[in-house]
Amino acid sequence: MSVAFTREEDVEATAANLPDRPISPHRNLVTPEGLAQLEAALAEARAAYQAAKAAEGISSDRTAMARATRDLRYYTARRASAEPVGPPPSHHVAVFGSTVTIDREDGRRQVFRIVGEDEADPARGSISYVSPLARALTGKAVGDEVTIAGGEVEIVEIA
């Protein structure tokens, strides 16, 4: 059947049937900054839900309501399961919340902060504590060599 013959309501109904955002099976560890980000996202989801609910009487944009409801469920669950973790007690070994500087074999120096899953952003230098890189670094000290993706890296600083 041609798209030209698809009813608009059918497209909207399909879009409104959004799957839930996946919830990680891992503990929901968060840094203080990550907790603030999570609370801001939850507030934004609540506002989007209220806006979609108010607009429901004016129009039937079921996609906006479905998206708002899905996000509200996700952020409510993530906030409820959040386990805030304070700053690392020392800088002797890499742990959750540590900023770790590594030197790669090719001469590149990289800096990563080990954070919770929802706050991880590798492009900005923050990695999830359950990522392979973070797992390889956790528990290691300055001067330790670690194998990552088949190559050796050296930990040169932990802050």
Image (cartoon, rainbow, N blue to C red):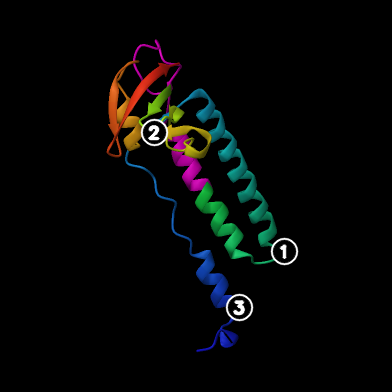
Q: For the view shown, which residue lies furthest in the right direction?
A: 58
Location of residue 131 (image quadrant): top left
At label 2, counting other C-alpha atoms closer than 10 Å, the crowd grade (few under 14, some 14-19, many 20 or more) is few
Instruction: Between label 2 and label 3, give the one nearer the viewer.
Output: 2
Q: Position of residue 114 (x, y in %)?
A: 42, 28
* Alpha carbon separation for disc pair 1 and 3: 18 Å
Q: Does the magenta portion include 75?
A: yes
**What residue is disc 3 on?**
8
Where is residue 21? Give x, y as percent: 44, 51
Q: Position of residue 20 (x, y in %)?
A: 44, 54
Q: CA distance from mark 1 to mark 2?
A: 60 Å
Kindly identify the residue that appears in the image at 53 percent across and 67 percent down.
15
Residue in front for this viewpoint, 150 or 127: 150
Task: Give SS at disc 3.
Answer: helix
**Kind of residue sitting beneath label 1:** Ile
What amino acid type is highlighted by mark number 3? Glu
Q: Earlier in the sequence, mark 1 or mark 2?
A: 1
Q: Residue at x 54, y 88 (%)?
A: 2
Q: Is residue 33 left or right of residue 110?
A: right
The earlier-in-sequence mark between 1 and 3 is 3
Circle 1 SS class: loop
Q: Which mark is residue 67?
A: none
* First in residue order: circle 2 vs circle 3: 3
Residue at image mark 2: 106
In this figure, which residue is indicated by the disc labeled 1? 58
Mark 2 secondary-structure assignment: loop
Region in magenta: 72-99
